[in-house]
Each structure stands twice: as structure tokens, then as C-alpha cells.
Amino acid sequence: GEKDSYFTFYIKEVQEYLNILIKKLETIKEEKTRLEEELSRKNVEITIKNKNIADLQELLKQTNDEKIKIALKADNYNTMVNSLIRENENLKKQIKDLQNQIITLNSKLESLQNVSTFQKIKSIFIKSDEH
């Protein structure tokens, strides 16, 4: 009688306690699932961010390579411009020399106007050869 009712009571208590534990376990499982999903999402985000970083690094590398190429081109153009300027200076000097030669020849011709044609021609060649 009394023993049976005590055992019945005890079994009920144990069952309630087990039910509580089962509920707690379910709650913990749900939380675990939620955390795993969140972790998975975060991992996807990290993967995307790492890819973005890699893309940006590649872009930066390409930009730096372009910068170097442009700098080299600029150097080549500067060298070219400088050599053209030098060539231009040389040509100016040559023109000036030719102008001076023309002036010299003109003055020789003027000074020879009183001499016979044959003498003129002869003197021009002789005096020009000295140069």
C-alpha cells in the first residue's frame, strides 16, 4: 500500500526530472545548431573578405606595375626630348656657321669685284681651300 504509493510518487518525480532534462537537452541542441549556422555564415563572410583582400592586392600590384611602366616611358621620353634638344642646338650652330661662311664669302666677293673674273674665281677657290 504505502510502499507502492511511495514508489509511484518517486517514479513520477524521476519522470518529471527526466522530462526537464530532455527539454534542457533539446534547448541545448537547438542552441548548438544555431551557433553552428552562425559559425558557417561567419566562415562564408571571412572567405568572401579574404577573396576581396586578394583581389585588392592583385589590383594594387597591377597598379604598381603600371606606375613603373609609365615612369620608364617618361624616362625614355625625357631622354628622347633631351637628345632632340641637343640635336636642335647642333643644327642651330651649323646654320649659324653656314650663315657666317656666307657672310665671309660675300665679303670676299665684294672685295674681289675690282679684280678680273679669272682672278676672282681663282682667289675664291684658293682662299676657300684654306678653311
Image: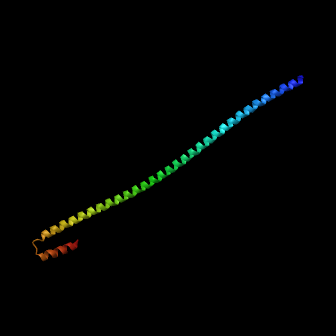
Quarter holding the N terminus is: top right
Residue 30 placement (x, y as % from top left): 68, 35
Give the side of residue 14 with respect to residue 127, left or right: right
In the rendered image, the vertical position of residue 27 relative to residue 43, given as above or below = above
In the rendered image, the vertical position of residue 95 relative to residue 21, given as above or below = below
Residue 75 placement (x, y as % from top left): 40, 56
At 19% across and 73% down in the image, what residue appears?
127
At 36% across and 59% down in the image, what residue appears?
80
Asked where in the image residue 96 lies, by quadrant, the reply is bottom left
Residue 110 placement (x, y as % from top left): 13, 68
Residue 67 placement (x, y as % from top left): 44, 52
Quarter holding the C terminus is: bottom left
Give the side of residue 1 with respect to residue 73, left or right: right
**Depth check: 77 or 109 in front?**
77
Labels in figure, total: 0
Give the side of residue 75 with respect to residue 126, left or right: right
At 80% across and 29% down in the image, what residue appears?
15
Give the side of residue 26 with respect to residue 1, left or right: left
Q: Which residue extends farthest left?
A: 114
Q: Which residue extends farthest front?
A: 1
Asked where in the image residue 44 lies, by quadrant, the reply is top right
Q: Which residue extends farthest top?
A: 2
Tell me how the rendering is colored. rainbow
At 26% across and 64% down in the image, what residue appears?
94
**Depth check: 128 or 48 in front?**
48
